[in-house]
Image: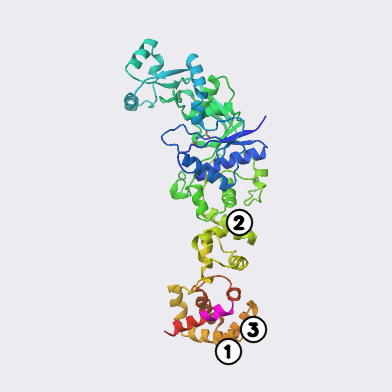
Amino acid sequence: MKIRVRFAPSPTGHLHIGGLRTALFNYLFAKKEKGAFILRIEDTDEERSTQESVNAIYDGMIWAGLNWDEGPMPDGSIKGDYAPYYQAARSDAGIYQKYIDQLLAEGKAYKCYCTPKELEDMRAQAIAEKRPPRYDGRCSRLTLEQQKELEAQGRRPVIRFKMPKEGETVFNDLIRGEVRFANKDLYDLVIQKTGGYPTYNFAAVIDDHLMEMSHIIRGDDHISNTPMQIRIYEALGWKHPIMAHLSMIHGPDGTKLSKRHGDTSVIEYKKQGYLPQALINYLALLGWSTPDSQQIFAPGELEEKFDIRGCQKSPAVFDPVKLLWMNGDYMRRMTIDELYAAAKPFIDETGVAQGVDEEYLKKIILLEQEKYKTLKEIPELISFFFTDKVVFDEAAIEKVFKAETASLALKSVIAKYEALADFTEFPIEAATKEAAKENGLKNGQVFHPVRVAVSGRTNGPTLFKMLEYMGKDMVLKRLEAALELCSK
Ligand code: GLU
């Protein structure tokens, strides 16, 4: 069997974390099985679909490295033999109409003329009578005469599919195993709207069949659609693809993932300084694991190890703290060239290191590689290297400069540093310790004021390396300015 899977977003907003996870699992499955990963745009909701959203989907997927083998391309070109890949265009090309006509002719679908008001009344009555609020099928019994009459009144029909009401619809899900639905819970769903566009459930079936999908991998929120889709496949005499429904994603509080849990757009994660490879690694573990619960995957490893049998049924929990940790972990594993390239846009955006020599900037970035959690925090953490005037943290002044020994400490290191010919890490350390010893101070009583004097902060990179990188002139200038401040 040729493996073909698709990601089929509705372009009605940004690409979110949940959508990216669905795309990722399809992508990984395709890679693992040496199949094709297809992007299809489900834009049949005319009011809510926008090209802007399609662009946001492209941006998110490309940033995350989920390149698709077939589908529309951001430059307007098309890849693959099953075009169009936009459902609106497919509708305009008459692709769905053909099957609508077939189902109507075979009596498997019917025209429904009910107005929104009538449907609402029907619902209200059903609820009042404690019946499930479903369409009662009344238009399926209209005679041709009656249909003509309604049309003469100016009513335009939608098309409904006749669902079976008895028995069961059963399918095997790769993740959930055997899934059974009682047909009495199905309803005659609308498959074509008055405007002529198909609805999601119908268009998805037609396209998944015509585009020869072997597997449908999507979120569990679609599982109640699946029995209805299976009935449509059957009505058309088609075999349905193999189904796999991914567990839902919950927030740490156990409720469905929402914005307040961090379910924002994928591009927002980019803006916040996450690495795409870290986000992808994290998302891969949302509902999937290897038998040995591997956490970090080398480039290309997910594509090799992904196995849909490792997907869980129970909801996965999105944990922003773990994601942040993982991002930091990825940042620590980067070479300095990789880290520099990733951090550069964030640094440039703030303008903190304008005109700074690249090799020097790399050294500075490297100083705190161990601590970074996101790319976005780098400019702020390194900014004091490049300012003309140190900005002092109020708390640091309070805590360190107000100590009686601060002036003495600064005065003595200034003298020591001035005399230092080799202004590098170890000689600086030795000189600083000597200054402490000669004045009867503890090391900390000297180290802390020096750190605050040159950086304005109480913490930062390892002290003596930081001084070496700043260079003697800058260090002395800053120490003197701090001494003046201390004496005030
Ligand atoms: N357009 C649907 C969605 O975005 C696709 C669902 C499916 O994969 O069948 O939810």
Predominant SS along the magenta part: helix
Q: Of helix, strand and loop, which one carries label 1? A: helix
Pinpoint residue 124: horizontal percent, then vertical percent.
Answer: 32, 27
Mark 2 is on which residue type? Tyr
Q: Which residues are magenta?
A: 471-477
Mark 1–mark 2 distance (CA, rounded to whole Å): 44 Å
Query: Which residue: 52% across, 64% down?
Result: 379
Q: Up-down: is 192 above or below 57? A: above
Crowding at label 2, few (<14), some or many (≥20) Cα neighbours within 10 Å? many
Q: 261 above or below 149?
A: below
Tag 2, which secondary structure? helix
> Which numbered mark, 2 or 3, is in the foreground of this view?
3
Q: Residues within 10 Å of mark 3 (few under 14, many from 20)?
A: few
Q: Secondary structure at mark 3?
A: loop
Give x and y (percent) for residue 453. Answer: 50, 78
In three-dimensional space, the C-alpha distance between marks 1 and 3, rounded to whole angstroms, equals: 20 Å
How far from the left and from the top, in percent, is residue 170? 55, 26
Residue named by callout 2 = 330
Which residue in the protein does label 1 denote? Answer: 438
For the residue pair 441 and 350, the one nearer the viewer reads as 350
Q: Quadrant of residue 364?
A: bottom right
Q: Residue under circle 3?
A: 421
**Residue 48 is one of the magenta-drawn residues:** no
Q: N-terminal of the two: label 1 or label 3?
A: 3
Quadrant hosting residue 4: top right
Query: Callout 1, which amino acid?
Result: Glu
* Of labels 1 and 2, the one closer to you: 2
Q: x, y (%) of residue 297? A: 64, 50
Q: Is residue 225 visible?
A: no
Task: Tell me which amino acid carries mark 3.
Answer: Ala
Q: Give the mark, 2 or 3, whose residue is nearer the N terminus.
A: 2
